[in-house]
Image (cartoon, rainbow, N blue to C red):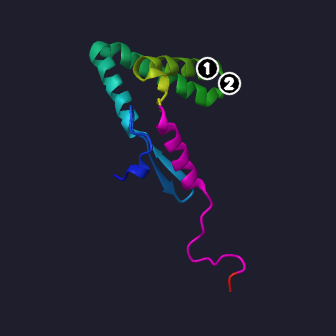
Amino acid sequence: MSADRTPVTGPFRIHVDARPTGVGIDVSHYLTAVVLGLAQAADEDGKSLLDDLRYIAELARSAAHQGSDSHAAHERDERVAELLAEVADDGVIPVYGEQVARLRDRLALLTAPRPVPGQREAGAA
């Protein structure tokens, strides 16, 4: 793993790679912490967590039929936000100090216009 693809090294590593249509932002280190938070919640009160997840799934199905501005969609979003607050610090990935600038610089580098391989530049003979 090269350091330039990992502009953020902590508290959660963030890797950024070029993709044909933009960039890929790898937040698997953070998602691992989220899964571990869910596992801990399941260990503490698995039945309650499973009930919450099933209710969120039911609300999601209902929202899919009723639309994004339905009561079900709003309640689903509230329940998900509550769960994220409990197990994932509200779903926010903290980035500190110089890592903010490195993340910005990496994104700027990968999103800058690049020549397309095999095509000549305008005006070239």
Q: Position of residue 87 (x, y in %)?
A: 40, 21
Q: Which residues are magenta?
A: 96-123
Mark 2 neighbour density, 10 Å: few (under 14) some (14–19) many (20 or more):
few
Magenta segment: does it hold 77?
Answer: no
Task: Give me the residue at 51% from left, 37% from top.
Answer: 100
Residue 29 higher or lower than 63, as above or below: below
Q: Where 112 sits versus 80, above or below?
A: below
Q: Which residue bears the numbered disc 2? A: 69
Across and down, in percent, residue 112 comes to 61, 57
- Pointers 1 and 2 in contact (C-beta within 8 Å): yes
Measuring 66% from the left and 76% from the top, which residue is drawn there? 121
The label shown at residue 2 is none
Give left or right: position of 122 versus 114. Answer: right
Judge the density around disc 1: few (<14), some (14-19), many (≥20) Cα neighbours within 10 Å.
some
Q: Most extreme residue toward the front, as rendered?
A: 98
Q: Residue 74 has which mark?
A: 1
